[in-house]
Image (cartoon, coloured by chain):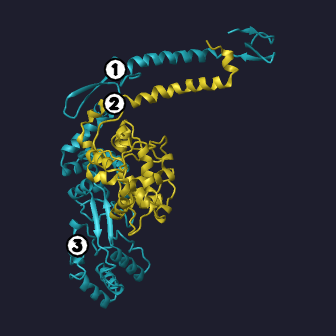
Chain colours: A yellow, B cyan
Amino acid sequence: MIKHESIETNAGLLVVLTLIVVSIGGLVEIVPLFYISDTVEEVEGVRPYTALELRGRDIYQREGCYLCHSQMIRPFRDEWLRYGHYSLAAESQYDHPFQWGSKRTGPDLARVGNKYSNEWHVAHLVNPRSVVPQSIMPNYQWLLENDLDYSDVQDRMRALKVTGVPYSETQQEYDSNVAEFGVDVADQLDILRAEENLMQQALANNYDGQHGRITEMDALVAYLQMLGTMVDFSKYDEGYFTDFR
Amino acid sequence: MNQEKTKSGGAVQTTGHAWDGDIQEFNNPLPTWWLWSFYATVVFAVVYWIFYPAWPVADSFTKGVMNTITFVDGEGNEKTTHWNTRSLLLKDLQEGKSAVLSREYTDKVAAASYSEILGDAEMMAFTRSMANGIFGDNCAPCHGTGGAGVMGLFPNLADDDWLWGGSVDAIETTIRDGRYGFMPAFRETFDDAQLDDIASYVLSLSGHKVDAAASARGRDIFQTDAGGCHYCHTSTGTGLKSQGAANLTDSVWTIVAVESAPDLAAKKALVKGVIANGVQRTMPHWSERLSPAQIKLLTVYVHELGGGQ
């Protein structure tokens, strides 16, 4: 039996025992989520981000969007009415780190994809007050001025691959993506074709409204327009999701 | 633990430890009210563990006893689950007080025709109040809280000018399926002088006094296959609603602020810019995000905003 006095007079032992005590809460609340079978819902449509969306997500983090915007619609009536279907765990399974956020100074963005037009996003990001007079969001006009740096997008995808996101490099990995996501998505997840895919998506959709240039705005708007659109909720009976709680 | 009275009036105890011979540690007990509150939270937690989902067990968890939620699933069957916030939400949306209250009216509006709704004061009052919230959450970011829109980007819904038609049916189609407003860019088709001529002709349609020769040259482009403008804007310039083509004969401008330009030269420059650069505007579709009843409420609301046709 360790005596009180021997703990208080031994800094090393005190540190070790303190760490054990403070980690109990986290261990009990977080660790079981990794082996409880109902944690992540079984839904179709959720896929890793394309190269362009991924760069958009990086810009989202760089500009600190998560400090004011959450990406987590909770299962409450008012949030259901304002933002749409509550967020599923499955929808952020390829997020590293997740962007749930912890504070809403601005509105939740978990289902902002396809809600407004690209033109709105561009006008709003350059100067939010040009479309929403009462907005207190800062201007992000440089997104339209900065050319998107995508020279390192392959390395960024490789880094995420280490965390478990199924981007492919070998033929075998590609084939398994085809089996899981279909050919079109699997092509987008191919690290070796990342730059080509990124340019193609940006130029074909021209998110920023500027012809022939790929700006940071292209990437960010591509990311925003994808948020919350992957799962087709019309395919599922609403009671289905209660089986995962 | 050893506790001994100190010399200072006997009020404060020490822990009994002594370091370096004479350094002692006071022991001030927690206030009784605090201590008992703490014990109460411990008791509460144990009760909570029994009735609510709590402890992880293997690949599942304790679900809580005597605490279930029953709701109706999509196939109309009653479904009972252990307590969880998702079932709670469904039950609230089905049986909650405000849900029941609003459903009474929503069902009534959903079952009624547009002419019945527009002629019924009670249904209109409900529509205005309910749709105001839906409009604020979904439409106001682009079209503004009052529906005034943004010049060049998002059309004004509060006037009586409708690009895609102002009937309730046209408005419903616009909201449900979205619209893609498109005019080609002519900057590579025509040279600067030709663009000037077309702009002159377009301004003449709304009664501006422009150079007659330039206007005539512009007319030849507008009304023939050279420009093909008349296909969408029609030969009289009033525009096809089916294409969302603007009426060029009135004084309402939605892409550039022609009316407020200081002089004719400035107006012509603005119109010329539109012809050169074209128009690409997207109205998203809402059929996946809003229910048919919500779209119906919005349709009536938007129709009212502009004193609809």
What amino acid is found at the position of numbered circle 2 in the picture? Asp
What SS does tag 2 mark?
Answer: loop
Q: Quick check: B165 left or right of A225?
A: left
The residue to which callout 1 is attached is B67
| Type of amino acid at the residue the image marks with label 3 | Cys
Image coordinates for residue A125, horizontal then vertical, percent: 45, 58
In which chain is the residue bearing label 1?
Answer: B
**Label 1 or label 3, whichever comes before in sequence order:** 1
Q: How far apart are labels 2 and 3 at the CA level?
A: 55 Å
The Cα atoms of the two marked residues, 2 and 1, are separated by: 19 Å
Q: Chain of mark 2?
A: A
- The numbered dot on residue B232 is 3
Residue B283, percent from left and from top: 31, 59
Check disc 1 and report its element: helix, strand or loop: loop
Alpha carbon distance from label 1 to label 3: 64 Å
Q: Amino acid at mark 1?
A: Asn
The residue mark sitting in front, 2 or 1, is 2
Residue A222 lies left or right of residue A103; in this view the side is: left
Are labels 1 and 3 on one chain? yes
Q: Residue B156 sits in which quadrant? A: bottom left
Image mark 3: chain: B
Residue nearest the viewer, comparing B86 with B207: B86
Whole-percent x and y of residue B254?
A: 34, 68
Q: Nearer the viewer, residue A220 or A72?
A: A220
Q: Quadrant of the C terminus of chain B?
A: bottom left
The quadrant of the image that shows the N terminus of chain B is top right
Q: Nearer the viewer, residue B86 or B18?
A: B18
